[in-house]
């Protein structure tokens, strides 16, 4: 039997409503902040992610689904959303848009070949936002405010927002030099990945899961000590404005976000709900100054975040929050014989095309079984259609909530059900 590929999942009809609720909520919140949807291709040129995400990252080195097309071009299934958004911004010359910053959101499947863990899949759905074209602490605060608004709108309580500053390129360069001096003499004690990162992106060593308990990790220099005056002032303003709007946060000087394009503000949102799991990160993001130029674009800056809908669902489960199921169908038609079965098909067509949700039993079961089926489908009303009803043109419309019935002309069903 052919089975689903490892690391993927079927979202069954009894669960898909949760995704629809979440996706609709995300879209509405994005609209409140004046972010508009941008859709990019499922696959892009491999070079986009090598240059944009960074050749030293696990995403590029280990996790990308890369293939060669019939024209010999190297293409990669999208593993993250920021690089494609930036590519689109550059290609479509959005820097000339009169509305700045350009504020977009995306909600798309991503693909990473990684070990399956609870809440992590090789195909997963990521919602993200990007604000490109303005470098100002207030935009950083807007992004963080929107992030918290999303999670709190679902009633989640066990949330902790951690922020830090990675500084500008000058600060980051000095910090990387300090990390090399710190780790280089004993780098042979670290995993092979860290041994290669020491020369490419030493900040990634701090993110290593294998060596996170090594004493040198715990005693490593912190980025805060290497921030220049401009970077310190920027971060100080971000913190002040977060306090002004009443948004709680904690500064974590060890939070560095290892992707090559991050500068200044970096952040992660964690869940400390009991039973959530060992990996507590819900969402992460930060500012990227220089990414557009790295991809041959204009001198513009951006900031954004990305969240996994799968992990949002996990957080809801951990806190016992249930999403309300959508309403059932408006009408269920029970049939008594072949003639009423055919008549019901015609009536269903008329009602559905006029915007009324309706259904019937296509297996021609007994009336009792049909009533049970109507209950499973959470029908608001039920009618029984037989020879007498067809001849008289009237039916008994039963309200499944209170059990009351009304005699209704068949031609008036639409008007009654719309009220």
Image (tube, rainbow, N blue to C red):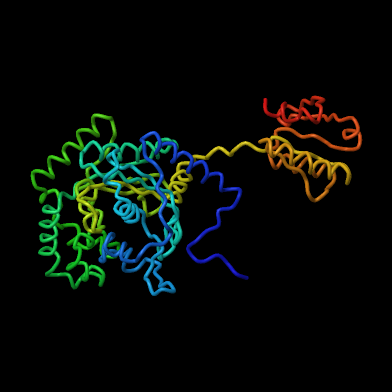
Is 293 drawn above or below residue 301 in the view shown? below
Query: What residue is rendered at 10% in x and 64% in y?
Result: 181
Q: Position of residue 110 (x, y in %)?
A: 42, 57
Query: What residue is rendered at 28% in x and 30% in y?
Result: 246
- 278 lies left or right of 137: right
- 113 lies left or right of 57: right
Q: Position of residue 274 (x, y in %)?
A: 41, 46
Front one among 138 and 149: 138
Is 154 drawn above or below residue 262 in the view shown? above
Q: Position of residue 327 (x, y in %)?
A: 62, 36
Residue at the left extreme of this rendering: 229
Residue 405 quadrant: top right
Q: Quadrant of the C terminus?
A: top right
Query: What residue is rendered at 55% in x and 65% in y?
Result: 4
Q: Quadrant of the N terminus?
A: bottom right
Front one among 346 and 185: 346
Query: What residue is rendered at 51% in x and 46% in y?
Result: 19
Q: Position of residue 92 (x, y in %)?
A: 33, 51
Residue 343 quadrant: top right
Residue 370 quadrant: top right
Is 202 drawn above or below residue 81 in the view shown? below
Front one among 380 and 211: 380
């Amino acid at each position: 039997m052919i089975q689903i590929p490892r690391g993927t999942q079927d979202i069954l009809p009894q669960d898909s409503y949760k995704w629809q609720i979440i996706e609709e909520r995300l879209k509405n919140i994005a609209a409140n902040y004046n972010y508009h949807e941008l859709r990019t291709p499922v696959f892009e040129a491999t070079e986009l992610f090598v240059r944009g995400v960074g050749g030293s990252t696990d995403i590029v080195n280990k996790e990308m689904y890369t293939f060669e097309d019939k024209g010999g071009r190297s293409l990669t299934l999208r593993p993250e959303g920021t690089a494609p958004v930036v590519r689109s911004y550059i290609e479509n010359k959005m820097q000339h848009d009169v509305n700045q910053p350009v504020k977009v959101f995306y909600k798309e499947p991503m693909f990473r070949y990684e070990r399956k863990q609870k809440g992590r899949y090789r195909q997963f759905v990521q919602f993200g936002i990007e604000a490109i074209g303005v470098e100002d602490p207030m935009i950083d605060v807007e992004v963080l405010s929107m992030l918290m608004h999303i999670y709190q709108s679902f009633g989640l309580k066990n949330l902790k927002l951690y922020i830090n500053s990675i500084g500008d390129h000058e600060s980051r360069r000095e910090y990387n030099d300090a990390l090399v001096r710190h780790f280089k003499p004993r780098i042979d004690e670290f995993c092979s990945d860290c041994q290669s990162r020491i020369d490419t992106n030493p900040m990634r060593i701090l993110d290593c899961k294998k060596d996170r308990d090594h004493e040198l990790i715990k005693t490593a220099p912190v980025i805060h000590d290497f921030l220049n005056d401009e970077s310190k002032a920027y971060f100080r303003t971000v913190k002040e404005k977060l306090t002004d709007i009443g948004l709680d946060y904690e500064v974590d000087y060890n939070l560095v976000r290892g992707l090559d394009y991050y500068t200044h503000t970096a952040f992660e949102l964690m869940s400390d709900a009991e039973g959530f799991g060992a990996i507590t990160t819900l969402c992460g993001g930060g500012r990227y100054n220089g990414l557009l130029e790295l991809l041959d674009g204009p001198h513009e800056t951006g900031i954004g975040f990305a969240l996994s809908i799968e992990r949002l669902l996990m957080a809801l489960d951990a806190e016992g929050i249930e999403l309300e199921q959508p309403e059932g169908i408006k009408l269920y038609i029970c049939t008594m014989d072949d003639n009423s079965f055919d008549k019901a098909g015609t009536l269903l067509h008329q009602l559905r095309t006029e915007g009324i949700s309706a259904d019937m039993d296509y297996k021609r079961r007994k009336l009792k079984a049909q009533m049970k089926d109507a209950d499973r489908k959470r029908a608001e009303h039920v009618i029984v259609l037989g020879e007498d009803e067809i001849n008289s043109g009237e039916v008994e419309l039963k309200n499944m909530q209170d059990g009351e019935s009304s005699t209704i002309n068949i031609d008036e069903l639409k008007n009654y059900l719309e009220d």
